Image (cartoon, grey):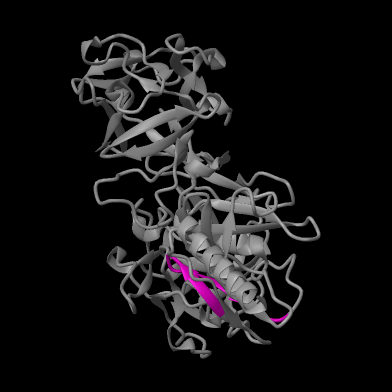
């Protein structure tokens, strides 16, 4: 009788295991990895590693659970995430992005997961795979007492304590493409303008303005106004399959629109209209024209954005649709929301209001970075090149603020600094090098300017020169980092990642 009971218990245990495997699709295979005093990579998802080592890392910017989520979204989507606190909804510091909670039937890889532990403290992670109400996850700082970390741990709706899942959205649309992300890389060759926030200037002082800051579609008219940086003078420009959606910051559900689309007429005023996917009247091609840009409607390619009678300094003057003319009334300039310029006669942005102090990797794209070649510590012989990012000390730089400029020193050689050799006599095309730091050396000081979705670096001693990647070969190991004149190319855009 006792033997039969043992068999029944064994059979019940086997059936329970089979039921769990069936409920989870049979694809989940949790395991453990032992870690110690040194950093160990216990798991990787879409190229983003999860790190463990012994210690209390609840608030740590590298090893905490929230640190992995932040690192993942920074690497894969170029999105800066915060508010990863107990019981909270994640938030984005990156323009146009937000997070919303989704239910069990909507979860997909790349979503952010949340649960509470035995002490009711919040824990954050990333979803790797989904089967029914169960998911495998990747995480940090979920430790066993035996210094082991779980790999492919399973969480399940209705079982895991306070389980919630959050989805990334961009301008209200689902932005999670299954977790593989949208890396911060060079835009497509035919993308003339980087995604970002801009003022659309008609000259150095006046801009396109949504009259009366109206949020009513069809009655939100565009006119000329003096530029003050107000939200109805700023526009989020988003590249969509060869065209651009242009939405005012004060009313992101609207977009610049050619009223009546293909039936639009020359002379009608430019308006904003409620955005809907595929609305060609709210999409624009952009052409380089004169020293600025010209905007042409997709639905009616005969019509361009035009300043009525070319009165560019007249407050309240209408912005119209008009047929193509070779005149300055159709020449517009883009100024980044922070004050930077992307073509045209606007001044450079030094990002003086921001403080970039701290340690950063200077990324060329999601995988490659600015690297001190051979980790040389010899001043004037330490040259800068492109290299895959591995987090080494010659790929991480300490930024120290001096007024509106920064000294940028590699961690492996803190006595050196990025330098425009010969200072004011530096020439376009010379390789970026390091030099022994001396207080007041303008050739080793740099302004940092907002540049679309990234930044660019301008030398103090020779402000005509920008840090540039030779021929924009940002994924070519050993490619030279040089100094070059400002040209609005992707070669001069870098992305700063906390390191």
Task: Give the position of the C terminus as an image quadrant.
Answer: bottom right
- The magenta segment is 41-54
The residue that appears at 52% across and 81% down in the rendered structure is 394
Percent x, y of residue 25: 43, 58
Task: Give the position of the N terminus as an image quadrant.
Answer: bottom right
Residue 439, can we see it?
Answer: yes
Residue 442, can we see it?
Answer: no
Percent x, y of residue 209: 48, 21
**Farthest front residue in view:** 1
In the shown orientation, is residue 325 left or right of residue 393? Answer: left
The residue that appears at 43% across and 84% down in the rendered structure is 373
Q: Nearer the viewer, residue 308 or 132?
A: 132
Q: Tell me if residue 46 is in the magenta stretch.
A: yes
Percent x, y of residue 106: 48, 42
- Place residue 293 in its image quadrant: top left
In the shown orientation, is residue 396 left or right of residue 202? Answer: right
**Farthest right residue in view:** 119
In the rendered view, tell whether residue 333 sits above or below residue 156.
above
In the shown orientation, is residue 370 left or right of residue 42? Answer: left
Q: Nearer the viewer, residue 315 or 195?
A: 195
**How many numbered discs?**
0
In the rendered view, tell whether residue 171 sits above or below residue 302.
below
Q: Tell me if residue 464 is in the magenta stretch.
A: no
Percent x, y of residue 178: 41, 52
In the rendered view, tell whether residue 51 sits above or below residue 261.
below
Q: Main secondary structure of the magenta part?
A: strand
The residue that appears at 37% across and 42% down in the rendered structure is 343
In the shown orientation, is residue 200 left or right of residue 64? Answer: left
């Amino acid at each position: 009788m006792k033997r039969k009971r043992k068999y029944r218990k064994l059979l019940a245990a086997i059936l329970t295991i089979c039921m769990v495997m069936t409920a989870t699709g049979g694809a989940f295979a949790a395991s453990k990895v032992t870690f110690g005093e040194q950093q160990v990579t216990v798991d990787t998802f879409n190229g983003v590693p999860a790190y463990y080592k012994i210690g209390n890392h609840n608030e740590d910017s590298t090893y905490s659970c929230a640190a992995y989520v932040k690192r993942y979204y920074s690497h894969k989507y170029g999105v800066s995430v915060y508010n990863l606190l107990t019981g909270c909804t994640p938030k984005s510091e990156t323009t146009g992005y937000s997070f919303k909670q989704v239910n069990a039937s909507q979860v997909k890889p790349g979503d952010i997961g949340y649960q509470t532990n035995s002490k009711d403290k919040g824990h954050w992670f990333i979803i790797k795979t989904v089967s029914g109400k169960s998911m495998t996850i990747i995480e940090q700082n979920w430790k066993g007492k035996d210094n082991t970390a779980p790999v492919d741990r399973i969480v399940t709706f209705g079982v895991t304590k306070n389980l919630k899942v959050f989805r990334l959205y961009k301008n209200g649309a689902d932005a999670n493409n299954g977790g593989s992300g949208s890396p911060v890389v060079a835009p497509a060759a035919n993308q003339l303008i980087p995604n970002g926030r801009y003022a659309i200037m008609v000259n150095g002082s006046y801009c396109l303005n949504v009259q009366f800051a109206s949020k009513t579609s069809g009655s939100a008219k565009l006119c000329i106004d003096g530029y003050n940086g107000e939200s109805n003078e700023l526009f989020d420009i988003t590249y969509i399959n060869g065209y651009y959606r242009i939405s005012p910051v004060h009313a992101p559900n609207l977009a610049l629109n050619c009223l009546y689309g293909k039936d639009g007429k020359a002379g009608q005023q430019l308006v904003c209209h409620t955005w809907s996917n595929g609305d060609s009247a709210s999409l624009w091609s952009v052409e380089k024209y004169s020293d600025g840009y010209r905007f042409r409607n997709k639905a009616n390619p005969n019509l361009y954005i035009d300043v009525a009678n070319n009165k560019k300094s007249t407050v309240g003057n209408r912005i119209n649709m008009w047929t193509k003319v070779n005149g300055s009334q159709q020449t517009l300039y883009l100024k980044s929301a922070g004050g930077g310029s992307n073509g045209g006669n606007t001044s450079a942005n030094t990002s003086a209001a921001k403080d970039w102090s701290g340690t950063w990797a200077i990324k060329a794209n999601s995988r490659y970075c600015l690297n001190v070649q051979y980790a040389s510590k010899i001043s004037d012989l330490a040259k800068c090149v492109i290299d895959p990012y591995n987090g080494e000390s010659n790929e991480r730089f300490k930024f120290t603020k001096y007024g509106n400029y920064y000294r940028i020193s590699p961690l492996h050689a803190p006595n050196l600094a990025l330098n425009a050799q010969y200072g004011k006599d530096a020439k376009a095309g010379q390789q970026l090098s390091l030099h022994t730091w001396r207080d007041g050396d303008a050739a080793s000081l740099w302004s940092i300017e907002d540049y679309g979705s990234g930044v660019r670096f301008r030398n103090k001693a020779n402000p005509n020169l920008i840090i540039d990647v030779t021929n924009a070969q940002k994924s070519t190991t050993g490619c030279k980092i040089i100094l070059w004149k400002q040209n609005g190319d992707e070669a001069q855009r870098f992305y700063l990642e906390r390191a």
